[in-house]
Amino acid sequence: MTAQIIDGKAFAETVREKVAAHVARLKEVHNITPGLAVVLVGEDPASQVYVRNKGKQTVECGMNSYEHKLSADTSEADLLALIEQLNADPAVHGILVQLPLPDHLDSDLVINSIDPAKDVDGFHISNVGLLGTGQKSMVPCTPLGCLMMLRDQLGSLSGLNAVVVGRSNIVGKPMAQLLLRDSCTVTIAHSRTKDIEEVCRRADILVAAVGRPEMIKGSWVKPGATVIDVGINRVEAPEKGLREDGTVKTKLVGDVEFDSAAAVAGAITPVPGGVGPMTIACLLANTVTAACRAHDLPEPD
Ligand code: NDP
């Protein structure tokens, strides 16, 4: 069997089109332009790329993008003051602080200083609690994108066995909450899980969010399962040759060994081109949702 490839890039395109259409209506009918503020502290190269992409796609959807780039030695007081200013700014509907933050900054404190209504990443403790208790909240973008792909692929998820490998606050735990909300039987596996291969083999839905290149092999996958690979790992790719400076070229791989898993699974997301593009699309969708809620207008579906 060869798995169907779930095209996250194409799906993200359709999500962005819907976002752009909603933004156009908000502007035309209500004179509201949703705005997203992204705060980047320091010069982490991967974070810089993410922030650039987020800003570009925000503008392409017709929204306002406000980028705040702060030096790596920014004090906590200065960062909190900026967030306070953004919280109070009616033109800003969504605020995202790019993680990870430099070590001297307390991420929990910073995230919890964002107005929960503008917390488009869904990491504020209020949003975490609302999601966990089944109330209306801001839902973290990466798990939301995964859920959308799963629903699109499988229709109802009710009664399916879902295994989430990874228990981080930004991916694993909210993913498990969303799957539970859709009536899956959910198992969260992590670094201390016994017989993890066997646990994974029970999964109708297997979500990998580990951060370990190609850890999950095809032999861990139940035949016909739907596999969502959240991992983004940069590894050396000697087959691509050397760069001009003599170092080995690199490539991105997921947490799942794609070829062996695709030979067994029913459907699988590729890396790149799977979960990644959906994450940014969901960020844009969350910003429109936040703008609608701020003005008591109906939210997008
Ligand atoms: P974290 O490092 O915060 O969490 C990793 C989780 O994996 C932990 O819960 C850890 O367990 C578990 N784990 C580590 N090693 C093993 C192992 N050998 N067996 C089983 N479980 C293990 O990572 P994130 O959740 O932030 O990210 C996970 C991956 O997803 C990364 O590759 C990241 O780059 C990617 N990512 C992709 C996004 C996208 O848009 N596509 C967005 C966010 C992340 P324990 O808790 O026991 O230590």
Image (cartoon, rainbow, N blue to C red):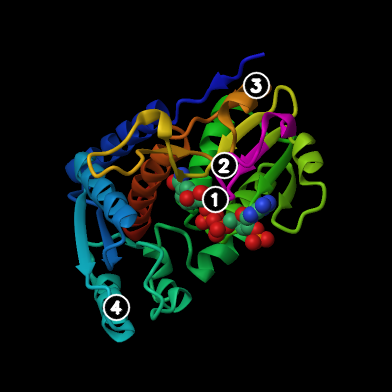
Dot in front, 2 or 3: 2
Mark 1 or 2, nearer chain start: 1
Q: Is residue 264 above or below residue 217?
A: above
- C-alpha distance separating marks 1 and 3: 23 Å
| Residue 15 in sight from this viewpoint | yes
Q: Residue at x 39, y 57 (%)?
A: 120
- Assess whether mark 3 and mark 2 are in contact (beta carbons under 8 angstroms): no
* The disc label shown at residue 266, or none: 3
Residue 170 located left or right of residue 294: right
- C-alpha distance separating marks 4 and 2: 33 Å
SS at mark 2 in the image = loop
Label 4 CB, ligand 1: below 8 Å? no
Dot in front, 4 or 1: 1
Q: Amino acid at mark 3?
A: Gly
Q: Which residues are magenta?
A: 206-221
- Assess whether mark 2 and mark 1 are in contact (beta carbons under 8 angstroms): yes
- Assess whether mark 4 and mark 3 are in contact (beta carbons under 8 angstroms): no
Q: Amino acid at mark 2?
A: Asp
Measuring from the top left, give residue 44's x and y in whole percent: 31, 61
Residue underneath mark 2: 255
Q: Residue furthest bottom?
A: 77
The rendered magenta stretch, by its main secondary structure, is classed as loop
17, 108: nearer the viewer: 108
SS at mark 3 in the image = loop
Toward which corner of the image does residue 272 lie, by quadrant?
top left
Residue underneath mark 1: 211
